[in-house]
Amino acid sequence: MADQRLEVLAGAAIIALALGFAVYAGRDSGLSARTGTYPLKASFRSVEGVTVGADVKLAGVKVGTITGLTLNPTTYMADAAIAIDQGIQLPTDTAIVISQDGLLGGTYVELIPGGMSDMLAPGDEIEDTQGAVSLINLLMKFVSSGSSSPSGSAPASP
């Protein structure tokens, strides 16, 4: 009888621990419903590497989440829906940029506040956007620009 009680207690502890991990993982991944947020919109030329649930950071601190990504068939731009924490007020000239944590790091969205006194209201669109920069394309441009001069040829002397 004592063995059964010990087994039941151990099982209950394991289930409680598993539920705790599940709640922590859901909250940390941005998949849980965020309360106390307001929506903003932005259109990007490219959102390469950004997915729904990606972090939105201001000064390196997470202040929001990407809640939706769709292709606008009229402009051929990627429209992003963003949820920003209620306590964060952003000037109307705020810029939004897709950034990376180093060369091999993850992709996130960065807010760069402007200096206007007017603030963005819920549902407003951030106009100043910079899409993702492809590291492969940059490297290809660098390599091709370095090989444009003929190698091994010396300049002609007068």
Image (cartoon, grey):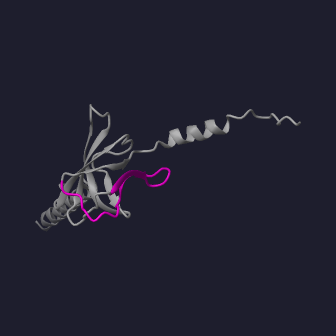
Residue closer to the observer: 158 or 112: 158
Residue lying at 41% horizontally and 45% vertically, measured from the top left? 132
Residue located at (32% from left, 33% from top): 76
Q: Which residue is depicted at the point 67% across and 35% down?
A: 147
Residue 82 belongs to the span the image colors magenta:
no
Q: Position of residue 127 (x, y in %)?
A: 31, 49
As drawn, is 89 to the left or to the right of 94?
A: left
The reply to whether residue 105 is visible in this rendering is yes
Whether residue 106 is visible: no
- Residue closest to the far left: 1
Report the side of 147 relative to 113 (left or right).
Answer: right
Q: Position of residue 18 (x, y in %)?
A: 22, 58
Q: Residue furthest right?
A: 158
Rendered-image quadrant of the C terminus: top right
Number of numbered markers: 0
Q: Position of residue 64 (x, y in %)?
A: 27, 57
The residue depicted at 24 percent of the width and 61 percent of the height is 119
Tell which of 104 and 94 is nearer to you.
94
Front-lying residue, 58 or 31: 58
Is 119 one of the magenta-colored residues? yes
Q: Is residue 155 above or below residue 40?
A: above
- Quadrant location of the N terminus in the rendered image: bottom left
Q: Position of residue 38 (x, y in %)?
A: 18, 57
Give the magenta part as a residue range. 94-122
